Image (tube, coloured by chain):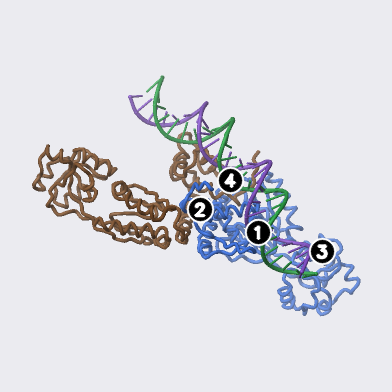
Chain colours: A brown, B blue, C green, D purple
Amino acid sequence: MHKCMNWGAINFDWNQVRSFLATAEKGSFSAAARVLEQSQPTVGRQVAALEHSLGVTLFERVGKSLNLTSAGEELLVHVREMADVANRISITATSQSNTIEGQVRITASDVMSVYQLPPIIKQIREMAPRLEIDVVAANDLRDIQRREADIAIRHVRPTQPDLIAKLVAEANAHFYAASSYLDQVGRPKTEEDLAKLDFVGFGDVTTMIGLLNSAGIPVTAQNFRTGSKTGIVAWELVRHGLGISVMADDVAAMTPGVERVLPSREPFKFPIWLTTHSELHTARRIRLVFDHLAKQLRNYA
Amino acid sequence: MHKCMNWGAINFDWNQVRSFLATAEKGSFSAAARVLEQSQPTVGRQVAALEHSLGVTLFERVGKSLNLTSAGEELLVHVREMADVANRISITATSQSNTIEGQVRITASDVMSVYQLPPIIKQIREMAPRLEIDVVAANDLRDIQRREADIAIRHVRPTQPDLIAKLVAEANAHFYAASSYLDQVGRPKTEEDLAKLDFVGFGDVTTMIGLLNSAGIPVTAQNFRTGSKTGIVAWELVRHGLGISVMADDVAAMTPGVERVLPSREPFKFPIWLTTHSELHTARRIRLVFDHLAKQLRNYA
DNA sequence: GTAGTGATATGCATAAATGCATGAATTGGG
DNA sequence: CCCAATTCATGCATTTATGCATATCACTAC
């Protein structure tokens, strides 16, 4: 039989709890294994071991997908709480750490990650060779409280209370298109001309239309025949002459083959906020990266 | 060097946190290892690994004993919270478990554990063979919230809010001494006579004197020339004729060679409270033991 | 229906953690 | 002042957990 070192629920493996949480949130052992950076058999076995040592069935194996038992659901509440505390431990530990080594995670839009971050990160790497910079390129907002990133570069002011945010720059953006495309369709003189051309969608098309309409450009869904949630892909579509889109001037300036549309139009303005957890800001390695990012991003004003 | 699978403090081993907690509370790796039922090298290595993966020094090794770093102290707050949540998980899991198997921990005074519990536990064992009953014989009050026991038998009403308590009996106690001792010093007729004899201390002598004084027996510390914190030892001392002590009548009745002193004196009365966590009370295996204990202990009224 | 996708479970080789035995160092007591 | 008793650190053998490859199963789409 088994060895049953810890009969009953007195002492259980805390790591197995984390496997359970990931499985419950992702819906399968395989998906949980991916986030935990472990293998599917491992996660499956850990959850099974937890079930055994707790004496409770957490999931119903109905062949296809796992369903949370009512007992599992009740436990999940506490398990989430435990994970929250674990995150707080992680944050507090980092804030206490005064060494300039270890990992720092920066999250930013994919466009900024590709076009603006690399040279800055190269500088940081030279300043602090033992620092490991991890860029999380994502257009959805990552949660700093849950430690999905240490530092976030955002274009909206964060609302959460425990976060500190610094407005480092006010960036300008204009309409851009490939010169080849404009040669073909002609260069618009007015915003009404503009509304007759093709646009390349960027993330959520609906909100983009709303934004443009409120800026006085009467575009509709008809204008958006191509697009991508991934900013870089959308920008490449623009570069290959598939239409017009709004882009930060800095990025556009380093992209050959595109030119500004309605050059005299007043620019769109958007803020660049640098964000981190207030506790993390006391950690030397975080502060170093934060301050250097602030300094360098200020140049893109 | 090391392999550093998880650089930075993003992902750390939750079990290592428990090792840290035990070490911080017990003051040494060895002591922590005893509580965790692990070896001292393991605990030491786990804490070292945690320090490494968190990038923080938790303890100062000053040769003799470990001292918590300020960083460690700050982390300890959150770590305790994490352990609390883990306990809640344990309790909730048990409350959800409807199988009559696994461990049930009962805590009681050592005297009760030795003289009264064994036959009851034997009955339970026959009723539920797959149940593992663990008796924690301790005269200090064990914490049910921290899951040091599932069911506690106490002589004071518990005050904590999440506990449910059942008054199962009102037991009687008298003065007892070995017949051989009374043959030697004579059988006292009054309480003043009594106060001239030797008493055997039971736990804290000061509170015992206070108790006897308020009962009208003018004893002083002079009367207590022997004693033991361990009730069974004290009772054995009584049985061997080293003096007088108060004892529950049931226990005294099954001890040959002792007889009641001042037999007509009205008995001391003390309550027997059965206590468990309110959530645990819904678990079938806990309920079974709880109810059977209540039923059997009622006979000792 | 039938092939294809994505999931869970199992056997087996490997990697990692654990425990034991031991040495070094420190404290407390005679 | 030295001896006894603890404590932490390290080398080594063993146990334990992990990952890979694979078989099996359920569901989807054509």
Residue A174 point in image, percent of width and height: 18, 50
Q: Chain of mark 4?
A: A
The earlier-in-sequence mark between 2 and 1 is: 1
User: Which tag, 3 or 2, sits closer to the chain's start?
Assistant: 2
Mark 1 — on which chain does it sit?
B
Q: Are marks 3 and 2 on the same chain?
A: yes
What mark, if any, has residue B236 been given in the picture?
Answer: 3
Mark in the foreground, 1 or 4 = 1
Q: The residue under label 4 is which amino acid type?
A: Gly
Residue A159 drawn above or below residue B183:
above
Label 1: few (<14), some (14–19) or many (≥20) C-alpha neighbours in 10 Å = some
Residue highlighted by disc 2: B53
Q: Are marks 3 and 2 in contact (CB under 8 Å)?
A: no
Q: Nearer the viewer, mark 3 or mark 1?
A: 1
Vertical position of residue B43 compared to residue B230: above or below:
above
Residue topped by disc 1: B31
Do the residues under discs 2 and 1 have CB atoms within 8 angstroms?
Answer: no
Among all residues in the image, which is located at the extreme left? A189
- Amino acid carrying label 3: it is Glu
- Total numbered labels: 4
Residue at image coords 14%, 46%: A261
Q: Amino acid at mark 1?
A: Ala
Residue drawn at x 21%, y 55% as measured from the top left: A269
Residue B146, placed above or below residue B206? above
Q: Residue at x 12, y 48 (%)?
A: A262
Q: Which mark is residue A55?
A: 4
Quarter containing the C terminus of chain B: bottom right
Rounded to the nearest angstrom, the CA distance separating label 3 from label 2 is 54 Å
Q: Residues within 10 Å of mark 2 (few under 14, many from 20)?
A: many
Residue situated in front as seen by the camera: A46 or B158? A46
Q: Is label 3 on the same chain as label 4?
A: no
